Each structure stands twice: as C-alpha cells, then as structure tokens.
Amino acid sequence: MNLLERFIQTFKITELRNKIIFVLGVFVIFRIMANIPMPGINTENLKSFFEQFQIFGLMNIFTGGTLEKLSIIMLGLGPYITSVIIMQLLTMIFPQMEKMYKEEGEAGRQKFNQYGRIAAVPLAMLQGYGMLTLFQKQGVIDALSPTLFLSSIVTIAAGTIFLMWLGELITEKGIGNGVSLLIFAGIVSSFPLSMRELIVKWDPSQIPGYILFFSIALVIIAGVVLINEARRNIPISYAKRVRGMKMYGGSSTYLPLNINPAGVIPIIFALSIMLFPGMIANFFIQSPGMLGSIAQNVNALFQNPWFYNILYFATVVLFTFFYTAVTFDPKAISTNLQKMGGFIPGIRPGKSTANFLYYVLNRILIVGALFLGTIAILPSVIASATGISGFGFFIGGTALLIVVSVILETMKQINAQLQMRDYETF
C-alpha cells in the first residue's frame, strides 16, 4: 500500500478521521491563544530584546513563537516539562518514587504523572514571575501595578496548565503524544514566516551557501529517520511446553532494541535545562556589585557559540542515557521472558540475560546519543559557516529533530491503527 492509498484509507475510517480532526481542532485553539498578547507591551523594545539575547530566541522556538509575542501562553509547556524532569530525577534518588513509576503498573504511572502536573503549577508561577520582572527591567513591558502583576502571573500559569490539559486531551482522545504534538505545532507555525524572511532577504551572492545549507538540512532529516528507525534485533526462543493434549512454544522471535530508544525527549529535556542559567543571569544582569558581574559573565558565556554548542551536545548525550535508564528496565524484561519460557540463545535466563541486555543497550546507545547530540548542534555550526542566519525553522537543529521525530512517531501510530483494522477485517 503506497502513501496515497494509506492517506485515503486513513480518512475513510470514521474513528481515525475523528481523532485527526480533533487534533487539528486543538492546534487551532493553541494558535489562537498564542496570538493573544499580555497588556502593556513595547513592540520595539521586545524586538531589540530578542535580537540582543539569543538564548531567548531559542526559547521562543521551543515555545512555538508564544514568547516572542508575549502571549498569555508565553511559557508554553516548559514548566510542565521541567516538573517531569524533576520527577524523573527523583526516581533515581528515592526508591519509593522508582517503585511507583516502574513496579506499580498503570495506577502507579497515573499517580506519578499527577504529581508532575501538580508540581507544574508552582513552577509556572515562579517562572512567570521571573519573566515578567525581567521584561519590566528591560523595558519590554510597562511597569505593572501589584494587582495587574499578580493577575498576569496567574494568567500565564493558567495558560501553561491549559496547554498541559490540551496535551492530555490529544493523548487520550486524539492520536500521538499530546505534548510532543503541541511543540511540533508551535515549531511548524513559524515555517511561513521563515520562508517569507528567506524571500525578503534573498541575496544572489549567497546562492552557494543556500544550496549547502539546504543540502545539509536534507542530510539531517535522512539521518534522523535512519537513527529513529534503526534497531538491534536480539533473537528470542521459547521453550516447548505441553498442556493437556496440546504443545505450546518452540517458536523464535526477536526483541528489537532501538538505537535511540529515548526518541526526541533528550532534546526537550536538554533545552529546558540549557535555558535556565541564561534566563537567571539575565534576571540579575543589572544588579549592582558582584552579583551583577557574575550574571554578566554567565550571560556572555552562554552567548559564546563554542561553549553553548559543547554544553548542549554533552547535555543531550547525558539525557539520552538518563532517560533510557529510567524508562527501559532490562531486569523487568528478563523476568518477563523467564516467566513466558523465553530465553536468548546462549545466555542463561535471569540475571545473565539482564546483564547481556545492559551490555547491548549501552553499546548501541553510544551511537544513538552521539548522533543525537551531533545533529542537535550541526545546523547552527553550518549556519555560522555559511553566514546564513535568521531562518529559525531551518537553522534550529533542535526544531528539525522534534519535527521529524514527531512526524515519524505519529505515522507509526496511524499505521498501527490501520493494521489493527486490517486484522479485524481479516
């Protein structure tokens, strides 16, 4: 079945069509909210602010352009993602949290996710307070009265919680991961403006640079698809079992280990962490004395492309290993295989199987993590080399990774739905 036939079949199935229409409807609500600005904005100061502090330009891409417009949802899903990171870190520290997340099944995961949602509320209010105070100091927004300041913080926090709820609705009633799809929608929404900027700033003398840049972008897309789809198949055999007059088992299959099992999550986690030092430094940059001096040095350090790219690369690699360690449990897989009478040929069941899975996973994960980190920083390096800048959609290796990964994951879920219908018909 070719792509066109799959597309037609997707919209022929009522349930699947309704899910896609629901997701598109949520996207419309998201974009309407993204264009509702906060009161008292100085447009010229806002533009110069984002030109001066590049770290906020990256944060703007991450929030889908809502920060640049200072909309009521200007924080995007950042506080919720930060709360998820904190909760994931707590599983490495507190055994009870790890038990809740890994051993208590679906009920434990729901409770774990609920704690993450609750923690997102104070984080959103704290981050909203910091952003509004910073924008007032920079002259981006007019001085707000205490009542208006408090109501603005509550509005910003409510916007984040509303987005979080929309993401949950997409996951529950739509198709795909809601949080990833909302981030995807925000990034893609900047594509028309990027194309307009490309046309307006067209310079025939830079044609070789344009060709090189877009060629690299195609290579990056191909590489992301290759790594996301690549997997190491581990052979699994099942022992023969006799129950009554029937014989079960005796078959062979494979356990697929993805080269990048964490998907796009490490990129999102790394971005959330990378944005905080620069944002905090900008908050204290006008303070007198040593505090202001330290803030200026930190800000200058994060504006340095070499330092930023190296730190970004290392953070992506570390989060790839961290997130995989949290979500993928070789011990549980080994136990389940043993219960079902499965084994890896040449490997003893139990602890030896778990150790073998750890060994294989860590080897292939090195390739996936290094590739993910390289792809994340490669477009900014190429942009510096070619001298082409300003096309946020194309330059952002992060944006490109998120877009391609989300499209691939959503296509997989749609294909799974189509195959399920095929089996039901058969």
Image (spheres, rainbow, N blue to C red):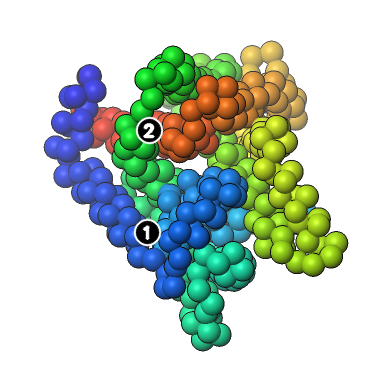
Query: Viewed as shown, does residue 22 lie left or right of 356?
Result: left
Pinpoint residue 43: horizontal percent, then vertical percent.
43, 61
In the image, farthest residue toward the right = 290
Q: Residue 34 carries which label?
A: 1
Quarter of the image for the C terminus: give it. Answer: top left
Q: Is residue 351 visible?
A: yes
Frontmost residue, 137 versus 112: 137
Frontmost residue, 367 versus 332: 367
Query: For numbered disc 1, what is the local secondary structure?
Result: helix
Quarter of the image for the N terminus: give it. Answer: top left
Which residue shows up at 54% across the image and 55% down it? 49
Mark positioned earlier in the residue sequence (2 or 1): 1
Query: Viewed as shown, does residue 24 lie left or right of 335?
Result: left
Q: Which amino acid does label 1 sit on?
A: Ala
Q: Which amino acid does label 2 sit on?
A: Lys
Which residue shows up at 85% across the image and 62% down it? 290
Q: Residue 201 carries which label?
A: 2
Is 276 rendered above or below residue 363?
below
